[in-house]
Amino acid sequence: MPSSHSTPFLRFCLLFLFCLSLGAPALAAPKPMPDHWVGTWAAAETDRPNLLRSGSPSPDGPALGSADLTLRQIVHVSLGGPLVRIELSNQFGTEPLLVGAAHLALTDSGSGISLISANALTFSGQPSITLPAGATVVSDPVALTLPAGANLTISLFLPAQTLSHVTAHDDAEQTNYLAPGNLVGAKSLPAGAQTLRHWYFLKSVAVQVPAADASIVTLGDSITDGIGSTHDTNQRWPDLLAQRLRHNKSTAGLGVLNLGISGNRVLHNGAGPNALARFDTDVLAQPGVRFLVLLEGINDIARATDPNHPFDPITAEDLIAALTQLAERGHEHNLKVFAATLTPYGGSNSMSPAGEQIRQTVNRFLRTAKVFDGVLDFDQATQDKANPTAYLPAFDHGDHLHPSDAGMKAIADSIDLKLFELNKKEKYDITHQP
């Protein structure tokens, strides 16, 4: 039985709790997550000696840094948004890179831009910036109504300077332009502007979008890069996948980032750093990345078993172990990782029975391995059923290694879009990646 002294105290506690309950608000719905930055375009970069290659087979035109020059470069974005920023890179430069001015606008045609959409870019509030050797920088965001699937023109003014090595993406399958002087804000470049088929110093473009939106990184070699597709038409399979995603209500908020490098390998350097070495910069550094598609290994096989000039030997087990490492690293960073089977290469100059045996062994592993979140069977989607070691003729670009536009479409169309649908919890977790 409580004492007479404890009764008032008990009453006080009950009264206090009652008052708290009166003042306690009802459980509120969680606040929506704020918008965040998601990649809409990206390119994997490599080291190039500072010798420009034009659209013609012969090198011509001034090297970057030899005079005041404007680079006007066009990229095909996947995801739209109201705020845009770009990232520039001097990753492989051996000297500082001075960007005297930068500018972006929606593409009109050729080197022309839509002036009504034009924006001068700044970096930490300044109109110019110097990138130390090895550095990357992000521009300040600008307001621009960027439609999904649009072409965006980025112009850089490069004052005369010493540049012995430049950071570039070769074989862009896109016509870009170079002209003397500072013409970043010009409606179009002079008729004599040099044409280029590469991107220089451009690492990525990002848009600010709702928290539910995210990006897919496609890590690969020339097949992902788009070699064999028609120039200036954006028929690379990642572009076609992006097109399918934005026309599907459940996946319309996903961007696709093409991190393919022509000639790239998983285990050895050559055409750019090997896939294991570039994983941090080309996958994990992408803003808003949630999914990874791996299509790499055919160059490792072709080089190691080339019937004419074999080098850098590997085994199927070596390649399987490396692809497993890429999947495990992706999972460490909360990515869903999908493996794509290696496409046919029968009839190509580098095809051999030993190489085909490795390809088949790797593909069997990819189709059954539990380390991946799913498999995209590009081999089945493109092979000639009468000759499964080779492309269906309609899907063959002609060298028996790269797909044609129709082959690129077959690859993109074979992908089950349901793999990229996220439930609400997964959408929320995108903005909380390590």
Image: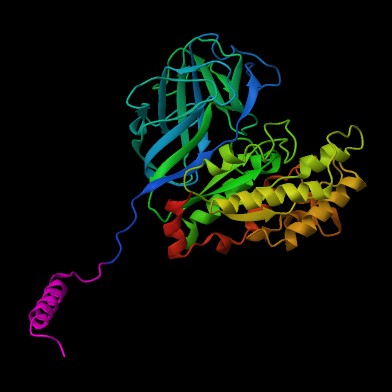
- Specify whether 293 is left or right of 187: right
For residue 53, say whether it is visible.
no
Q: Most prominent secondary structure in the magenta stretch?
A: helix
Where 418 falls versus 194 (above or below)? below
| Picture quadrant where residue 220 is located | top right
Question: Magenta stretch containing residue 9, yes or no?
Answer: yes
Q: Quadrant of the N terminus?
A: bottom left
Q: What x and y, as percent, mark residue 58?
A: 70, 17
Give the camera-side residue of 422 and 325: 325
Give the camera-side residue of 212 and 381: 212
Residue shown at 54%/23% (left/top)? 177
Where 432 falls versus 51 (above or below)? below
| Number of numbered discs on residues | 0
Question: Magenta stretch containing residue 99, yes or no?
Answer: no
Q: What x and y, as percent, mark residue 276?
A: 67, 41
| Picture quadrant where residue 99 is located | top left
Q: What x and y, as percent, mark residue 13?
A: 13, 76
- Specify whether 116 is left or right of 56: left
Where 287 falls versus 5 (above or below)? above
- Specify whether 415 is left or right of 389: left
| Picture quadrant where residue 81 is located | top left
Q: Which residues are magenta?
A: 1-28
Where 26 falls versus 174 (above or below)? below
Residue shown at 10%/83% (left/top)? 7
For residue 45, say whether it is visible.
yes
